[in-house]
Image (cartoon, rainbow, N blue to C red):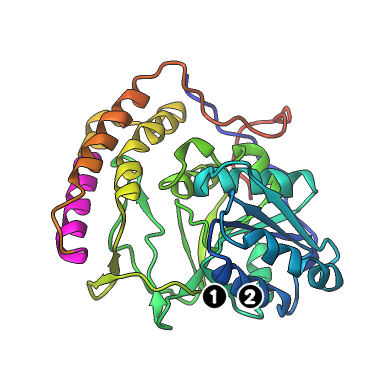
Amino acid sequence: MTKQPQPPAPPVTEPFDPSSATVVVVTYDRSALLSRLLDSLLVMDPPPGRVVVVDNASTDDTPAVLDSYAARFADALPGGLVVHRSPVNTGGAGGFSEGVRVAWELGATWLWLMDDDVEVVPDALGRLGRWAERFRSVQPRRYDFDGSEFYWQYRQSTALGIPIPFAPAGFDASGFRDMNSGCFEGMLVHRDVVARIGLPDPRFFIYWDDAVYGWLASRVTRSVIVDEFALRRTREIRQWDMGVRHLNASSDRYRYYILRNRGIMRHYYRAHGALKPVRFALGTLLTIAKELVRLVVVERTARGTSNLWRGLRDGRRIARDRSFTTMPPLAPAPAQPSGRLR
């Protein structure tokens, strides 16, 4: 069944208030990186109103690290530090689903989503605030581990279900570019958008979850990437430098989910009347080709292809599941004509 476009929310008329923003962090077994991120959040100027950390059943000293920061955040932020510990590792997708739920229930107006392997530029929220007065889905730029500009594929081909590899990296005088994707390394989203597209889907576990969530946001509001550096990556990843962009190393788990989760993507595209079966299948083939290149060129191995075929098989099984339903909105849609958020 094709979903109808969600009706627009009332326009935001008040100036951006940094204290209305809740930072949502997902972490798993990376306490040293988490500490670095938390330290950067404590010195932000202006500061957010609250930080929510989802600990995805870490087996290291993450719980103790979070306990050690509780008093410092209580003194620094109105809402302090809120920790949600999952009994099992639900992956990045499950973690952000829970984090958005917690922030939503705490009344956050703005939700700023990020992994634990970044740190925040001190004046980042101030930089993003002027864009938050115009747009309800905002993606900032990031520095890579070495301090270079990190290129992120902010446009995707809906027909193929893949990122557009070389979308323009530069910005014109407007300072922003329209995007139809999302990345949970810095995505800033208004609760009105969350209300209409629901929580991130935990069934992705890892991969495509943020891309689909950003795509859903772009269907109800104008989503933009802005020429503001707000985050810096703190984890070095082996890469192939392609000039305009980098191709990062991956893992067997990622190889599996990048294909398995295309079955979930297919359901979302179908539900929103955007599925082009033949083109989507071509996008799957292109995804396989990219992962083979990643294996050979970046990781310098031919091992790991079995995870691609397992993911392809399980993705087809999910795609054929007629009982699959997409995530529901969080609030009843008001009775008014269909349209987009302003």
Q: Residue at x 38, y 55 (%)?
A: 155
Q: Earlier in the sequence, mark 2 or mark 1?
A: 2
Q: Say what secondary structure mark 1 lies in.
A: strand
Residue 15 visible, this orientation: no
Residue receiving disc 2 = 124
Residue position for label 1: 228
Residue placed furthest toward the bottom: 147
Q: Quadrant of residue 28?
A: bottom right
Q: Is residue 42 above or below residue 199?
A: below
Above or below, 47 against 206 in this view is below
Magenta residue check for 293:
yes
- Contact? badges 2 and 1 (CB < 8 Å): yes
Depth check, front residue: 252 or 119: 252
The residue shown at (62%, 53%) is 55
Label 2 sits on a secondary structure element that is helix
Q: Which residues are magenta?
A: 283-299
Query: In this image, 333 relative to 121: left or right?
Result: right
| Residue 1 percent across, percent down from the top left | 47, 19
Mark 2 and mark 1: Cα distance apart in space:
8 Å
Q: Residue at x 39, y 64 (%)?
A: 152
Q: Residue furthest top?
A: 322
Res. 45 image quadrant: bottom right
Estimate the x, y position of residue 305 in percent, counting from the top left.
18, 45
What percent of the width, then of the height, locates residue 124? 63, 75
Q: Residues within 10 Å of mark 1 (few under 14, many from 20)?
A: some
- Which amino acid type is marked by label 2? Ala
